[in-house]
Image (cartoon, grey):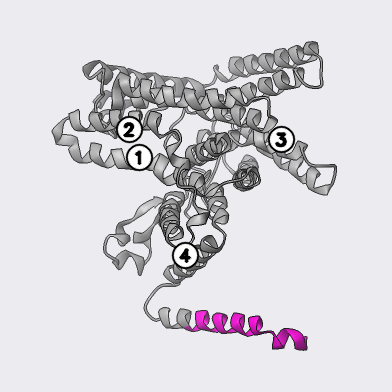
């Protein structure tokens, strides 16, 4: 005890703690406690990232699946009075990504050895072609909507890579850190799965009981519908099972398997058709991999047949419900709108960010479905906004990453990432998260693994 009291580090800690308390008390006379909390947390997180940059990426991965956690500064009496900042209304993961980019710039100045400057430029040529097409699309769009297209070019199009993938590529160097970041994503997914499990007994069922996210204190971290929850959970399922299986038998392994099972079960219980398709693909990928490893080809074939049969029965049952019919009609009409406007500008599209405004101008859609919706699929989104050239350029980039993973499929870590990659983009053929952190943080980790 006496040694601890005499240690100079103890008194340094006490002094810093006292300073923080005094500063907090002074600030409380001018700012709300929420503003003070955000300020203190920002300073503490910034200091942690400067000391250990990898933790910054782990936090980014943890926040990535919670794209529905939107921070509205106008709701706070202190923050709302600040110029520009007071009008901020954005997902927490987006705000954190911007802060992390600023911290990376600081690291480049004071600790350049911690930054891999060359990493984000490895596959930039292909992505640069895509961004060139998007820029031309914005330039050639109707001048009346230039503000919309210019804003959309920077966010979400440019920001999806610059904000979510680039920090990962600049900081993450080892497979251990990649696995830790994926585990941070899994931890957040477990929270979403617990929320989905609670909803099965606490939320009023519409048609039939299904796992859905709900609001907590006015915030909806995992969105407002079952599709968004399934989107957040399904991508991490391959890692969850792989990470659990590689651990020796212990209490920790049992907990990891329980977490993987919970995430998988809740993903199925969302009864999202996209989620079931993705999980079916993951199961087929597992049986295919096991067929070349430890079990006979016949057993693997029987596993694939069982998965296909279960998926077929699910679709037979779900397609007979009113919810599925209504969803199909909505998606069909959204696709029709995309094709109509694509015909008017087939090469470069209508301009980035124009999908929702054009849907809002479609009176028949608003009469049938109410508020305009974004494209339920990456292809429809790019087809209307960036045209044929945009779809081709982005498709080449995605195919190049898939090919790089395929070449490395002999390593089980890369094979797991290949299944994750295909699952992630397979889901985005049917949903709206193609520009979100939940996709592009994982893309950053996948590219880092390839490098």
Residue 64 in the image: state x and y as whole percent: 51, 45
| Near-viewer residue (3 or 374) | 3
| Near-viewer residue (153 or 436) | 153
Residue sitting at 26 percent across and 64 percent down? 83
The label on residue 192 is none
Given this view, does label 3 or label 2 mark the residue nearer the observer? 2
How far apart are the alpha carbons under marks 3 and 2? Answer: 36 Å
Please rate how many residues cluster around mark 3, counting C-alpha atoms within 10 Å: few if below 14, some from 14 to 19, many from 20. some
Identify the residue position indicated by label 4 in the image. 42
Q: Earlier in the sequence, mark 4 or mark 3?
A: 4
The label on residue 241 is 3
Residue 178 in the image: state x and y as whole percent: 61, 44
Identify the residue position indicated by label 1 in the image. 158
Given this view, does label 4 or label 1 mark the residue nearer the observer? 1
SS type, badge 4: helix
Question: In which quarter of the view is residue 373 placed?
Answer: top left
Decide: marks 3, 2 in contact (CB < 8 A)? no
């Amino acid at each position: 005890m006496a040694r601890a009291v005499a240690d100079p580090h103890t008194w340094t800690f006490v002094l810093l703690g006292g300073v923080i308390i005094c500063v907090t008390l002074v600030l409380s006379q001018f700012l709300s406690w929420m503003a003070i909390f955000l300020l203190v947390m920002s300073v503490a997180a910034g200091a942690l990232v400067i000391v250990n940059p990898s933790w910054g990426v782990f936090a980014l991965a943890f926040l990535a699946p919670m794209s529905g956690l939107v921070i509205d500064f106008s709701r706070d009496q202190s923050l709302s009075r600040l110029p520009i900042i007071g009008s901020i209304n954005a997902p927490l993961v987006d705000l954190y990504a911007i802060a992390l980019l600023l911290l990376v710039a600081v690291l480049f100045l004071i600790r350049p050895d911690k930054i891999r400057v060359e990493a984000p430029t490895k596959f930039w040529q292909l992505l640069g072609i895509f961004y060139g097409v998007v820029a031309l699309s914005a330039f050639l769009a109707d001048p009346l909507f230039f503000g919309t297209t210019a804003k959309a070019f920077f966010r979400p199009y440019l920001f999806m890579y610059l904000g979510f993938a680039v920090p990962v590529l600049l900081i993450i160097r080892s497979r251990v850190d990649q696995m830790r970041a994926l585990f941070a994503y899994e931890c957040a997914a477990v929270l979403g799965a617990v929320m989905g499990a609670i909803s099965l007994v606490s939320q009023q069922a519409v048609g039939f009981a299904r796992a859905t996210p709900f609001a907590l204190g006015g915030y909806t971290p995992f969105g407002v519908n079952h599709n968004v929850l399934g989107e957040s959970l399904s991508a991490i399922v391959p890692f969850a099972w792989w990470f659990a299986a590689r651990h020796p038998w212990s209490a920790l392994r049992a907990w990891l398997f329980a977490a993987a099972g919970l995430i998988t079960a809740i993903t199925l219980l969302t009864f999202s058709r996209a989620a079931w398709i993705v999980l079916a693909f993951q199961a087929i990928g597992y049986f295919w991999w096991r067929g070349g490893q430890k079990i006979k080809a016949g057993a693997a074939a029987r596993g694939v047949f069982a998965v296909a049969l279960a998926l077929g029965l699910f679709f037979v049952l779900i397609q007979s419900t009113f919810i599925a019919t209504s969803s199909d009609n909505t998606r069909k009409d959204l696709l029709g709108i995309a094709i109509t406007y694509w015909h008017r500008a087939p090469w470069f599209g209508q301009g980035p960010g124009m999908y929702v405004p054009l849907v809002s101008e479609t009176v028949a859609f608003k009469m049938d479905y109410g508020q305009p919706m974004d494209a339920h699929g990456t292809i429809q989104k790019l087809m209307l906004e960036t045209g044929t050239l945009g779809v081709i350029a982005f498709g080449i980039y995605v195919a190049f990453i898939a090919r790089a993973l395929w070449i490395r499929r002999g390593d089980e870590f890369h094979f797991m990432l290949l299944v994750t990659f295909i699952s992630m983009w397979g889901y985005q053929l049917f949903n709206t998260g193609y520009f979100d952190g939940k996709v592009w943080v994982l893309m950053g980790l996948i590219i880092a693994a390839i490098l």
